[in-house]
Image (spheres, grey):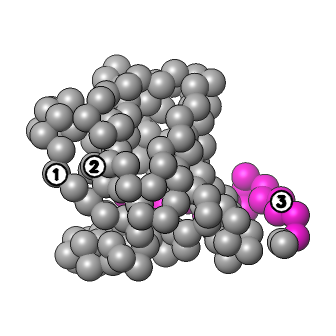
Amino acid sequence: MFDPILLRAADAEIVSDAPGSDITLLADSDTTDGGFTANRATLKDGVFGTPAHFHTRATEFFFVLEGKLQVLVEETLHTLEKGDFLAVPPRVPHAFGPEAGSDADVLVTFTPGMARFDYYRLLDRVARGEADPSEIAASSKQYDNHYVDSPIWRAARGQ
């Protein structure tokens, strides 16, 4: 059991994995006794979003706070709008980014919790040129983030 968590917006750490893509770190597994991990993804129109990937241990939840979020689940594209909720179970390939013509503000949670904050900090260092992108692939087992190729996602994102 963990103590109640109160994080004021002014005290939250914000990292970026690309220009226009901010990740606000809310609660990691070390503060939730492994129960969950939570962050807020703020994605500007035109941002690629995440490459297709899956997690072996955790379910990932998406709740759209504002805007529209395009999400790939296996081989199906979905558009989530404000108030929409999606749960992606372990081992299901998925990806997400803002719908074309829209920003997206999304609450993202994982359960059970995974130590993710250092992964987001690594993405931030890579985006700033302070770490090599090969470190992301090398960390896939540590952070339970396994990338897969998705022609459907690449086409949807214009690549």
Highlighted range, magenta: 3-18
Q: Residue at x 27, y 50 (%)?
A: 51
In the image, residue 6 lies in the stretch drawn in magenta: yes
Relative vertical location of residue 94 with respect to residue 117 in this rendering, above or below: above
Indicate the amino acid at tag 3.
Leu
Distance from the alpha carbon under mark 2 to that under mark 1: 6 Å
Residue 69, can we see it? yes
| Label 3: element kind | loop
Pointer 3: residues within 10 angstroms few (<14), some, or many (20+)? few
* Left or right of 140 in this view: 121: right
Q: Is residue 42 above or below residue 3?
A: above
Q: Which residue is mark 2?
A: 52
Instruction: Name the residue carrying label 1.
Output: 149
| Number of numbered labels in the structure image | 3
Q: Which residue is mark 3?
A: 6
* Residue toward you, 15 or 87: 87
Earlier sequence position, callout 2 versus callout 3: 3
Question: Is disc 2 surrounded by few (<14), some (14 to 19) or many (20+) residues within 10 Å?
Answer: many
